[in-house]
């Protein structure tokens, strides 16, 4: 099945006692979607050849030298996020299951820009005529989503898939164990060190009663939503209500120490020493409940061998993940003004050396009609620290100014995501850690390529104090290949394209004060989510539900500034 948007299979995880690093995480945390001031955003951040704006210093550090004055800017922003979710049928399975079309919204107040720059006139008529020094904080990306999907299903079950995953894990462990190791059974899910060597989702699922062993050896499992026949065959016992939700939040900011120089009003140069900080929070849950509990009979045998009958009511699984990171980079830029209104600009940024700290936790609960059989479990809180390099970037721009009446500009940016790399210390890292990171880096090189970004902006000044602006962004995904575990090969996939449109107004007083307003709309992006594993396809062709999530957002920015 081929999709033109990213498919995330949430239920397929590596051993959860390991940290959550992946090639996708490196890409997610490395991507930029520049904000800055309201003026820079309204013009699509197409400022490589323009400059003069503190929001554009993230694009080209030479831009600070263009302004012949000192300035201070403050840019609060509001983000309005919208998610629309519904069932997405597979090509050969028309039932969407998540039949309900749901819409959810989320709002966040942030700070897109805060900074100042000081301009110093050298008094020279040629050579270095002036230089600037500034400290600017610009937001380079943000995440905000609150998504929910629901429906009914009569063929597949999250709990049944969890049982199949646990059974597959035990089979793999027993087939790959050392000769002197004991047989792994369901009792290992209850051991005190289970979170050290077993999949956390399987551990919390078993301990909470989402699934149970159905054989005497404790190596075969069935979900609490399944009916088990003589001989061990099992299937979904009835119709279930299903709900999936996820929430993301966080932002990435650049703290820039900027230096710029004006050489003969012809060449402008600039340098940034940047500190990159990021915070990213992600959580998702899956809920399942019986439409008719009487269909979901569960038999429990106590220590005395007495059978007790109860009925499955509902269950919930949740995963929480947090990342905090700090990185360091440098950026060098130049703007050339040959005359006749033409302007050219270029900038290059070093890879960002980033230190990451992350934590994650999983939990599950299962409820029955007889509450004495209810169960719940929460994993340990996982923690990990590591380093990785975000990719190098290069910007190129051209602009044309028509006196004080209008400005038009266009930018091209390239970032080589194949250069992303997880880093380890050979002296301090265990052999298993080194092997894991080397495998991740190989996966990055196989999956990712260069991402391309096009930006365009227009500013018209019908009055000396009033500016009207618009802008456009096109970004191509760096993900160019996906991995097929069945063939153990990578296959090409269509690139995801992200579109932003922006517009705004600007006011400049005759004295020092100026204010700008901008709105940016990120067009809807399609995301296909498969919440749990494909556990029945090889048996009867039944496929798990798929969700189509369409996410878009509006961002409104207001810049207040003073020149002096």
Image: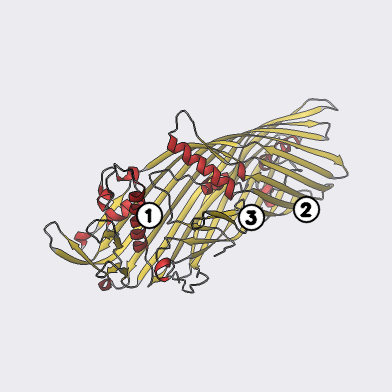
**Label 1, on which residue?**
318
Where does label 2 land, which residue? 460
Q: Indicate the position of residue 526 as horizontal and vertical percent values.
A: 56, 62
Q: As rendered, which of 403 and 514 lies closer to the eye?
A: 403
Cα separation, mark 1 vs mark 2, equals 51 Å
Q: Is residue 385 visible to the viewer in this orientation of the structure?
A: no
Disc number for residue 113: none
Sequence-wise first label, 1 or 3: 1
Q: Quadrant of the C terminus?
A: top right
Instruction: Kindly indicate the quadrant of the structure image that contains residue 181.
Output: top left
Relative to 429, say whether 466 is above or below. Answer: below
Total numbered circles: 3
Asked whether disc 1 touches disc 3, contact meaning CB atoms under 8 Å apart, the reply is no
Q: Mark 3 points at which residue?
A: 519
**Among the two numbered marks 1 and 2 on one chain, the one whose residue lies closer to the N terminus:** 1
Q: Distance between the residues labelled 1 and 3?
A: 35 Å
Residue farthest toward the front in the current orientation of the protein: 179
Q: Quadrant of residue 365?
A: bottom left
């Amino acid at each position: 099945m081929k999709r033109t948007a990213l498919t995330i299979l949430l239920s397929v995880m590596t051993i959860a006692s390991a940290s959550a690093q992946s090639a996708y995480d490196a890409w997610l945390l490395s991507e930029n979607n520049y904000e800055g001031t309201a003026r820079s955003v309204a013009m699509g951040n197409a400022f490589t050849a323009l400059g003069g704006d503190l929001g554009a210093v993230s694009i080209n550090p030479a831009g600070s030298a263009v302004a012949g004055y000192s300035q201070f800017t403050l840019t609060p922003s509001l983000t309005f996020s919208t998610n629309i979710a519904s069932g997405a049928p597979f090509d050969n399975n028309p039932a969407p299951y998540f039949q309900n079309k749901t819409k959810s919204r989320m709002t966040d107040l942030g700070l897109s820009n805060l900074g100042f720059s000081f301009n110093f006139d050298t008094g020279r008529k040629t050579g270095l005529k002036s230089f600037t020094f500034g400290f600017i904080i610009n937001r380079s990306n943000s995440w905000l989503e609150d998504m929910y999907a629901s429906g009914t299903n009569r063929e597949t079950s999250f709990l049944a898939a969890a049982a199949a995953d646990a059974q597959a894990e035990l089979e793999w462990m027993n087939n790959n164990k050392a000769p002197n190791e004991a047989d792994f059974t369901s009792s290992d899910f209850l051991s005190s060190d289970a979170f050290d060597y077993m999949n956390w989702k399987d551990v919390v699922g078993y301990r909470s009663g989402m699934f149970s062993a159905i054989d005497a050896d404790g190596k075969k499992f069935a979900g609490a939503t399944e009916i088990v026949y003589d001989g061990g065959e099992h299937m979904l016992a009835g119709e279930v209500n299903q709900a999936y939700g996820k929430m993301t939040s966080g932002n990435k900011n650049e703290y820039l120490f900027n230096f710029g120089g004006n050489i003969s009003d012809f060449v402008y140069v600039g340098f940034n020493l940047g500190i990159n900080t990021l915070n990213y929070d992600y959580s998702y849950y899956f809920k399942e409940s019986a439409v008719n509990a009487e269909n979901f009979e569960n038999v429990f045998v106590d220590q005395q061998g007495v059978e007790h009958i109860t009925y499955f009511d509902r269950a919930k699984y949740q995963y929480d993940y947090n990342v905090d990171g700090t990185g360091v980079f440098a950026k060098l830029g130049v703007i050339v003004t040959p005359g006749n209104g033409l302007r050219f600009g270029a900038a290059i940024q070093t890879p960002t050396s980033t230190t990451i700290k992350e934590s994650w936790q999983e939990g599950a609960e299962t409820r029955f009609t007889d509450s004495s059989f209810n169960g719940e479990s929460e994993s340990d809180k996982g923690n990990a620290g590591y380093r990785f390099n975000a990719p190098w970037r290069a910007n190129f721009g051209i602009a044309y100014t028509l006196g004080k009446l209008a400005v038009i500009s266009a930018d091209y940016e390239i970032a080589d995501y194949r250069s992303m790399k997880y880093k380890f210390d050979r002296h301090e890292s265990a052999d298993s850690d080194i092997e894991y990171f080397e495998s991740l880096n190989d996966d990055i090189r196989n999956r990712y390529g260069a991402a391309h970004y096009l930006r365009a902006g227009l500013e018209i000044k019908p009055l000396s104090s009033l500016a009207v602006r618009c802008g456009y962004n096109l970004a191509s995904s760096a993900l160019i290949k996906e991995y097929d575990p069945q063939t153990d090969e990578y296959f090409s996939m269509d690139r995801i394209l992200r579109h932003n449109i922006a517009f705004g107004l600007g006011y400049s007083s005759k004295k020092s004060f100026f204010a700008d307003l901008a709105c940016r709309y990120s067009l809807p992006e399609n995301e296909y989510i498969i919440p749990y594993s494909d556990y029945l396809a090889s048996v009867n062709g039944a496929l798990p539900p798929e969700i189509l999530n369409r996410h878009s957002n509006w961002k409104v920015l207001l810049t207040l500034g003073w020149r002096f």
